[in-house]
Image (cartoon, rainbow, N blue to C red):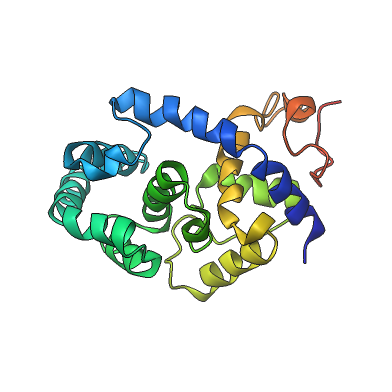
Amino acid sequence: MCSSLLSASNILKEKAPFMRAFMKNYIFEQIKVPLSIESIEKKESYEKIIEFCLNTRRRIRNEHLESGKKYFSDNYALFRELLLVKKDVIQLQQLVYKAEGVGQKIGSFILVVFIHYILQDNEMSKQLNVPLDTHVIRIFEEAFNEKPPNVGYKIDAKEYRDFQGKLKENSADGNTIYFDYFWFIGKVFHTKINPGRNNKGYRLCSMCWIKDVCQSNDKWE
């Protein structure tokens, strides 16, 4: 067990109500759909959430965006059944990751939004992968000296599966999704002062949620 990762996960677990309120503003109010099961039961709301998630891919190609939207629209009934009736995360993952242009980051993000934020189903959340974007990877590397696979790794790659397994072993309640909050830390607290020049550390270290378990010596005092 990695005590620093487990400690961080327990800290992040306490931030779950804040993160849900933040996501309500960040996604749901922006696209004008409710943060509730109603957004799954209504196809129009479901499609708006999917489009938002697909657009978080950096430099997404228009043909991938359009094919992705069509794919998820065509598979709405199956997605809804697997999510609400069967609660089958494995089949949901197979369905989501099969979409053209959807890799580990976007696919995992879609599932996190619907399962962790909308349904708030803790048991289903335990089966999800942590979306590894540049912010999340940076926190693992710089704050915990971990080496996650890069953004482009496939979900069936051994390195990817091994890392997700390590997170599960070192997460509060066995729910790895709390580590997804690292992207918020990366965007808000993890901004360098004078990056690349006379660097004095991170601008908001003293306010960072995980400052007491961070292993980085490059901090602003």
* Image position of 35 (left or right of 144): left
Instruction: Find residue 79 and report its image quarter.
Output: bottom left
Name the residue rendered at 72%, 43% in the picture.
11
Name the residue rendered at 43%, 24% in the picture.
25
* Image position of 86 (left or right of 105): left
Name the residue rendered at 50%, 56% in the picture.
125
Residue 61 visible in the current orientation: no
- Residue lying at the far front in this picture: please name it: 85
The image position of residue 162, as x and y in percent, is: 58, 72
Residue 5 visible in the current orientation: yes
Q: Nearer the viewer, residue 49 or 68?
A: 49
The image position of residue 204, as x and y in percent, is: 72, 25
Which quadrant of the rendered structure holds the N terminus?
A: bottom right
Instruction: Find residue 139 and report its image quarter.
Output: top right
Which quadrant of the rendered structure holds the C terminus?
A: top right
The image position of residue 29, as x and y in percent, is: 36, 24
Name the residue rendered at 51%, 29% in the picture.
21
